[in-house]
Image: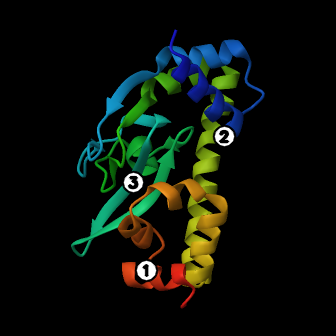
Amino acid sequence: MDTLLKETVSAVVNSRYPDMTSSGRKQLEDILVKKEVEKGELLLKEGEISRNIVIVGKGMLRQFYYKNGKDLTEHFSYEGCVVICIESTLKKEPTRLMIEALEDGVVYLLPYDKLLLLAETSWELNMFYRKTLEYSLIVSQIKADSWRFETARERYNFLLRTDPEVVKRAPLSHIASYLLMTPETLSRVRSGAL
């Protein structure tokens, strides 16, 4: 019995669709594919088509892309989080986003096509799928609004308040790019000088 699998499914389902029954959770567990990852490993590369939703069992991942030669972090994920490259997954087109393991860990790949098949026959899996997409869209909107309307200090304080694991575990250079600031600006914000 894979205890990490059960704990991970429980964490993800409870955060997205807590009313899912044990039989619905079992259906989800049955289609997940366990993958051990090493720090620095790319789970998805630019130009590939994303065919899986990634659920983090252990470790930390980041989604990132390159713009004008700069490495920009889009999103961090850790235990109990879901990673999805929405456009590539839904449209079955090559992505510009990449997924990198920031720590050694374990992820569970949720094959998108299998999820869709289950969603057609299981109301619970359909709701889980819908809630997962809704959650992802809300997180993206919150981040976009933060970039548009908040100061560097406000963005950092929001991250500290809502995602302290990121601040504890992710490299400062990735945190700075995620917050749309230079490492020097992040250093000044952290020291209270800005």
**In the figure, residue 16 lies in which quadrant?**
top right
Say whether disc 1 or disc 2 marks the residue closer to the N-terminus.
2
x then y, percent, for residue 52: 40, 34
- As helix, strand or loop, the secondary structure at mark 3 comes to strand
x then y, percent, for residue 147: 54, 76
**In the figure, residue 72 lies in which quadrant?**
bottom left
Tell which of 63 and 122 is nearer to you: 63
Amino acid of disc 3? Gln
- What residue is shown with label 3? 63
Instruction: Work out how far the residue at label 1 is from the one at label 3, CA to CA, in angstroms.
Output: 17 Å
Label annotation for residue 181: 1
Other residues around mark 2 within 10 Å, as few (<14) / some (14–19) / many (≥20):
some
Amino acid of disc 2? Lys
x then y, percent, for residue 132: 61, 41
* Number of marks present in the image shown: 3
Residue beneath the point at 40% across and 67% down: 172
**In the figure, residue 73 lies in which quadrant?**
bottom left
User: In the rendered image of this protein, does residue 29 appear above or below residue 148?
Assistant: above
Q: Nearer the viewer, mark 1 or mark 2?
A: 1
- What residue is shown with label 2? 131
Instruction: Work out how far the residue at label 1 is from the one at label 2, CA to CA, in angstroms.
Output: 31 Å
Q: Nearer the viewer, mark 2 or mark 3?
A: 3
x then y, percent, for residue 123: 69, 23
**Pointers 2 and 3 in contact (CB under 8 A)?**
no
**Pointers 1 and 3 in contact (CB under 8 A)?**
no
Amino acid of disc 1? Met
- As helix, strand or loop, the secondary structure at mark 2 comes to helix
- Seen as rendered, the residue at the extreme right is 19
Residue beneath the point at 55% across and 17% down: 3
Tell which of 164 and 66 is nearer to you: 164
